[in-house]
Amino acid sequence: SVTNTSFPTSFLGQQLSVVAKMIGHHAERGVETDIFFIPNGGWDHHSSLIAASKVKFRELDNSIKAFADEMKSIGMWDDVTVIQTSEFARTLNPNSNGGSDHAWGG
Protein backbone atom coordinates (compact mmCIF):
# COMPACT_ATOMS: atom_id res chain seq x y z
CA SER A 1 0.00 0.00 0.00
CA VAL A 2 1.28 3.46 -0.86
CA THR A 3 0.40 6.98 0.22
CA ASN A 4 -0.14 10.08 -1.90
CA THR A 5 2.23 11.99 0.37
CA SER A 6 5.94 11.54 0.97
CA PHE A 7 6.50 10.99 4.70
CA PRO A 8 9.72 11.81 6.59
CA THR A 9 12.10 8.92 7.25
CA SER A 10 12.07 9.61 11.00
CA PHE A 11 10.49 7.07 13.34
CA LEU A 12 7.47 9.33 13.85
CA GLY A 13 7.12 10.01 10.13
CA GLN A 14 7.19 6.32 9.29
CA GLN A 15 4.73 5.43 12.05
CA LEU A 16 2.31 8.13 10.86
CA SER A 17 2.66 6.74 7.34
CA VAL A 18 1.49 3.34 8.61
CA VAL A 19 -1.41 4.95 10.47
CA ALA A 20 -2.36 6.88 7.32
CA LYS A 21 -2.44 3.62 5.35
CA MET A 22 -4.58 1.97 8.03
CA ILE A 23 -7.03 4.87 7.99
CA GLY A 24 -7.06 4.87 4.21
CA HIS A 25 -8.17 1.22 4.26
CA HIS A 26 -10.71 1.48 7.08
CA ALA A 27 -13.60 0.33 4.86
CA GLU A 28 -11.71 -2.76 3.67
CA ARG A 29 -10.83 -3.54 7.29
CA GLY A 30 -14.50 -3.19 8.27
CA VAL A 31 -13.98 -0.52 10.94
CA GLU A 32 -15.54 2.87 11.48
CA THR A 33 -13.38 4.00 14.39
CA ASP A 34 -9.72 3.40 15.23
CA ILE A 35 -7.41 4.55 17.99
CA PHE A 36 -3.69 4.62 17.26
CA PHE A 37 -0.90 5.34 19.75
CA ILE A 38 2.59 6.31 18.64
CA PRO A 39 5.27 6.91 21.28
CA ASN A 40 7.48 9.86 20.41
CA GLY A 41 10.54 9.75 22.65
CA GLY A 42 13.79 11.66 22.64
CA TRP A 43 12.58 14.82 24.39
CA ASP A 44 14.59 14.35 27.61
CA HIS A 45 17.16 17.10 26.94
CA HIS A 46 19.52 17.44 29.89
CA SER A 47 21.97 19.30 27.65
CA SER A 48 21.79 21.49 24.54
CA LEU A 49 18.07 22.04 25.08
CA ILE A 50 17.54 24.66 22.38
CA ALA A 51 19.42 22.84 19.60
CA ALA A 52 17.95 19.44 20.49
CA SER A 53 14.41 20.84 20.75
CA LYS A 54 14.71 22.47 17.32
CA VAL A 55 15.52 19.08 15.80
CA LYS A 56 12.64 17.34 17.60
CA PHE A 57 10.10 20.07 16.78
CA ARG A 58 11.16 20.03 13.12
CA GLU A 59 10.66 16.25 13.08
CA LEU A 60 7.26 16.61 14.77
CA ASP A 61 6.18 19.43 12.44
CA ASN A 62 7.24 17.63 9.25
CA SER A 63 5.63 14.36 10.33
CA ILE A 64 2.32 15.92 11.37
CA LYS A 65 2.24 18.02 8.19
CA ALA A 66 2.73 14.92 6.02
CA PHE A 67 0.01 13.10 7.96
CA ALA A 68 -2.40 16.04 7.62
CA ASP A 69 -1.63 16.36 3.90
CA GLU A 70 -2.30 12.64 3.41
CA MET A 71 -5.55 12.74 5.37
CA LYS A 72 -6.71 15.70 3.28
CA SER A 73 -5.74 13.95 0.04
CA ILE A 74 -7.89 10.92 0.91
CA GLY A 75 -10.77 13.01 2.28
CA MET A 76 -10.37 11.91 5.90
CA TRP A 77 -8.96 15.06 7.56
CA ASP A 78 -12.34 16.15 8.95
CA ASP A 79 -12.77 12.70 10.53
CA VAL A 80 -9.41 12.51 12.32
CA THR A 81 -8.33 13.88 15.70
CA VAL A 82 -4.63 14.17 16.55
CA ILE A 83 -3.60 14.47 20.21
CA GLN A 84 -0.06 15.10 21.47
CA THR A 85 0.69 14.77 25.19
CA SER A 86 3.67 14.81 27.51
CA GLU A 87 3.92 13.03 30.83
CA PHE A 88 6.49 14.93 32.86
CA ALA A 89 7.47 18.42 33.88
CA ARG A 90 10.78 20.21 33.35
CA THR A 91 12.58 22.90 35.33
CA LEU A 92 12.16 26.44 34.07
CA ASN A 93 15.78 27.42 34.73
CA PRO A 94 18.48 25.78 32.58
CA ASN A 95 21.06 23.50 34.16
CA SER A 96 24.82 23.99 33.73
CA ASN A 97 24.76 22.03 30.43
CA GLY A 98 22.21 24.27 28.76
CA GLY A 99 19.46 21.71 29.28
CA SER A 100 16.61 21.29 31.75
CA ASP A 101 16.08 18.76 34.47
CA HIS A 102 13.09 16.82 35.75
CA ALA A 103 10.63 18.71 37.93
CA TRP A 104 7.34 17.89 39.53
CA GLY A 105 3.96 19.40 38.78
CA GLY A 106 2.97 20.03 42.41
Image: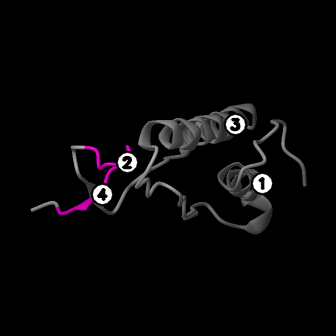
Say whether residue 47 is magenta. no
Taking depth in this image into account, of 78 and 67 the one nearest to the observer is 67
Residue 84 in the image, given as x and y percentages of width and height: 44, 50
In the rendered image, which residue does mark 1 sit on?
21
Q: Which residue is outermost to the left?
A: 106
Mark 3 vs mark 2: give the one in front.
2
Kind of residue at disc 4: Asp
| 3D distance between C-alphas at marks 1 and 4 | 38 Å
Mark 4 vs mark 3: give the one in front.
4
Q: Which mark is residue 10?
A: none
Q: If you read the primary sequence from the N terminus, does the residue marked by circle 3 or circle 2 appear first?
A: 3
Looking at the image, residue 94 sits to the left or right of residue 71; the answer is left
In the rendered image, which residue does mark 2 sit on?
99
The residue that appears at 16% across and 60% down in the rendered structure is 105
The residue that appears at 74% across and 32% down in the rendered structure is 73
SS at badge 3: helix
Q: If you read the primary sequence from the N terminus, does the residue marked by circle 1 or circle 2 appear first?
A: 1
Up-down: is 65 above or below 92? above
Kind of residue at disc 2: Gly
Marks 3 & 1, CB-CB < 8 Å contact: no
Q: If you read the primary sequence from the N terminus, does the residue marked by circle 1 or circle 4 appear first?
A: 1
Q: What stretch is highlighted in magenta?
A: 94-104
| 3D distance between C-alphas at marks 3 and 2 | 29 Å
In the rendered image, which residue does mark 3 sit on?
66
Give the number of callouts: 4
| 3D distance between C-alphas at marks 4 and 2 | 7 Å
In the rendered image, which residue does mark 4 sit on?
101
Taking depth in this image into account, of 32 and 46 the one nearest to the observer is 46
Marks 4 & 2, CB-CB < 8 Å contact: yes
**Badge 3 density bin: few <14, some 14–19, many ≥20, Cα 10 Å:** many
